[in-house]
């Protein structure tokens, strides 16, 4: 029997890269994806190969439907199957929530194009591969922003709220052949926030977060990847769920 295959969008860094390594270590072959810089994606592919996986590295912008369909064609030609699709590629603009003039319609369109439409287009492009074998499923990488309405900007939080809702509608529409779930990470230690906020604001936010969270910790990409792996490979009777991975920030301390 051929090995199972996991496709991870936006897997050249951060959560996506951790996820590719986790599935590689768990016995899957992995397709690694990026939209701009090939070198980090190729480095992730080498790490996955060292863990025993066959790899494919594909440049594709998930906001572009032709790219999504070409990506699915490449996976079909290489392995003829896709067991887990992780819609991880995401985009934001850091704008204070009170600064309404700081967000344009174009900002909303470009954020939704990746975070919502991109995820939908990937599911559509990979649907026949995902249903070719029993157990196929999708894990969308959402955000705590879409649950509690806080985060890098109103457009970003709204897009992740839409992704949470789409997780539910797709789970209903595509069952019983496919499961569709999401993870909603809290504050993750990585380039996304370090670059977006700058070091000083990142450290201040980390301290505030850790003083509030029940588990007194921000989250690592590996923490998120473990939950994605569970949903993708083990949670066979869960669908339409949005699993928060936030170190207990949402519930807070007693
Ligand atoms: N970091 C956090 O605190 C946090 C918290 C909650 C949720 N999340 C979510 O987690 C996901 C990953 O975030 P991260 O922190 O791991 O970010 P990251 O380190 O910046 O990684 C983003 C990845 O996505 C790729 N990418 C960006 N736009 C793309 C597109 N249109 N098509 C295909 N690939 C694209 C990037 O590569 P290229 O630049 O080469 O395209 C990169 O591989 C996002 O959906 C984000 O919303 C992050």
Image (spheres, grey):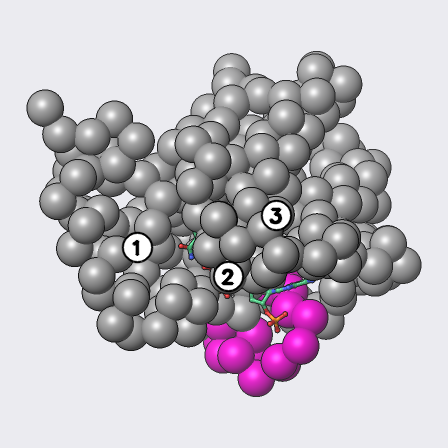
Q: Secondary structure at mark 3?
A: helix
In the rendered view, tell whether residue 121 sits above or below residue 201: above
- Asked whether 31 falls inside the magenta stretch, the response is yes
- Which residue matches tag 3? 155
Mark 1 surroundings: few (<14), some (14-19) or many (≥20) residues within 10 A: many
- Which residue matches tag 2? 94
User: Which quadrant is the N terminus positioned in?
Assistant: top right
Span of residues in magenta: 29-46
Q: CA distance from mark 2 to mark 1?
A: 20 Å
Which is nearer the N-term, disc 2 or disc 1? 2
Which is nearer the N-term, disc 1 or disc 3? 3
The label number, if any, that marks residue 204 in the structure image = none
Splitting the image into 4 quarters, where does residue 245 fall? top left
Q: Name the residue at the left extreme.
A: 254
- Which residue matches tag 1? 220
User: Which quadrant is the C terminus positioned in?
Assistant: top left
User: Residue at 51% of width from left, 59% of height from top?
Assistant: 95
Between 219 and 54, the residue placed more toward the observer is 219
Residue 215 percent across, percent down from the top left? 15, 38
Residue 222 percent across, percent down from the top left? 33, 53
């Amino acid at each position: 029997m051929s090995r199972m295959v996991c496709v991870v969008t936006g897997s050249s860094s951060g959560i996506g890269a951790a996820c590719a390594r986790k599935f590689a270590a768990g016995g899957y072959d992995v397709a690694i994806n990026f939209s701009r810089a090939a070198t980090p994606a190729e480095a992730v592919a080498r790490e996955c190969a060292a863990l025993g996986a066959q790899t494919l590295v594909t440049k594709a912008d998930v906001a572009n439907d032709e790219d999504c369909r070409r990506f699915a064609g490449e996976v079909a030609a290489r392995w003829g199957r896709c067991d887990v699709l992780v819609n991880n590629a995401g985009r934001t603009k850091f704008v204070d929530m009170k600064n309404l003039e700081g967000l344009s319609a174009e900002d909303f369109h470009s954020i939704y194009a990746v975070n919502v439409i991109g995820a939908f287009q990937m599911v559509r492009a990979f649907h026949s591969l995902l249903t070719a074998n029993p157990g196929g499923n999708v894990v969308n990488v959402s955000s705590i922003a879409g649950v509690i309405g806080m985060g890098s900007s109103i457009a970003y939080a709204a897009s992740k709220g839409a992704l949470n809702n789409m997780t539910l509608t797709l789970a209903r529409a595509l069952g019983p052949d496919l499961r569709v779930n999401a993870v909603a990470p809290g504050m993750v230690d990585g380039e996304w926030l370090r670059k977006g906020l700058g070091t000083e604001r990142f450290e201040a936010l980390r301290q505030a977060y850790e003083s509030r969270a029940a588990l007194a910790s921000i989250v690592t990409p590996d923490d998120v990847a473990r939950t994605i792996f569970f949903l993708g490979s083990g949670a066979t009777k869960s669908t339409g769920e949005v699993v928060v991975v936030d170190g207990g920030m949402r519930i807070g301390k007693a």
